[in-house]
Amino acid sequence: MHPTTRSLQNCLRSTLPSARIDVVSLPKLDHLRLALINADFSTAPLPPETMRKVIANPAYWAFCWGSGLASAMWLQANPDKVAGKVVADVGCGSGVVAIAAAMAGAAHVYACDIDKDALLAAKTNAKLNNTQIQLCEHIDQLPPNLDQVWMADVLYDRANLPLISAIKHRAPNLIISDSRVRDLHDPDFTLVRQAEALTFPNLGEFDEFRVVNFFEYSADLCHN
């Protein structure tokens, strides 16, 4: 076990007792490593008691979801997207987008998630990659001088849709990446990019979620 991941493994095993945390490199990303669930974790049906724990406290932060992976790949290829900016990763999960933004030269990066285990994951992964990010539990704790917000794989739960309007009032630029949403039904957003990526490790994700859609809102464009 990597010495920095012990607390994270304890969090994971409180939900999935037979799982472990492995520090792994991500596909198509240079020099970015994450502490994630072991790739050989069994995909067999879980015992009823374990399934109840998963439903009550899902360890979604133990995966690098496809939209987060695709976002990090885009940032690696286009660091000018965030260079010198104040950036927030809302619904950060593992923190992959926040870390990629920091590695791409963002001036300040915030990782925001209501799940304290996710914040621990983001903190652990930032340390693994020698990057500096700041953590917050709620968007109200984000600073007023944000330049840009990223939301990757957040809209799987339709209850999170109100986040869009809340963020639009806090930053002039918002990028939503999601493989499960085909249309935001919001004229302020433009589909600017599509990319292929699957969740890593891939424990049986359907190919229908291979294509990640990127929707971008820019206050400057909307006000012109």
Image: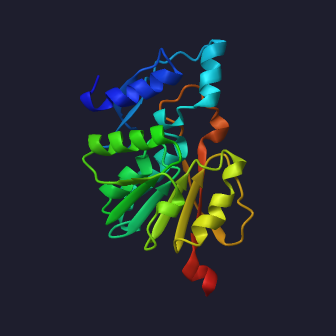
- Tell how many labels: 0
Q: Residue at x 54, y 55 (%)?
A: 151
Q: Is residue 132 visible?
A: yes
Q: Residue at x 52, y 63 (%)?
A: 140
> In the image, 157: left or right of 169?
right
Q: Residue at x 43, y 44 (%)?
A: 119
- Rendered location of residue 41, percent (x, y): 49, 18
> In the image, 202: left or right of 10?
right
Q: Is residue 58 above or below residue 76?
A: above
Along the line of sight, which residue is nearer the eye, 182 or 125? Answer: 125
Q: Is residue 166 above or below residue 48?
A: below
Q: Is residue 182 above or below residue 40?
A: below
Q: Is residue 144 above or below residue 105?
A: below
- Rendered location of residue 21, percent (x, y): 39, 25
> In the image, 123: left or right of 14?
left
Q: Is residue 45 visible?
A: no
- Rendered location of residue 4, percent (x, y): 28, 32
Q: Identify the image quadrant of residue 54.
A: top right
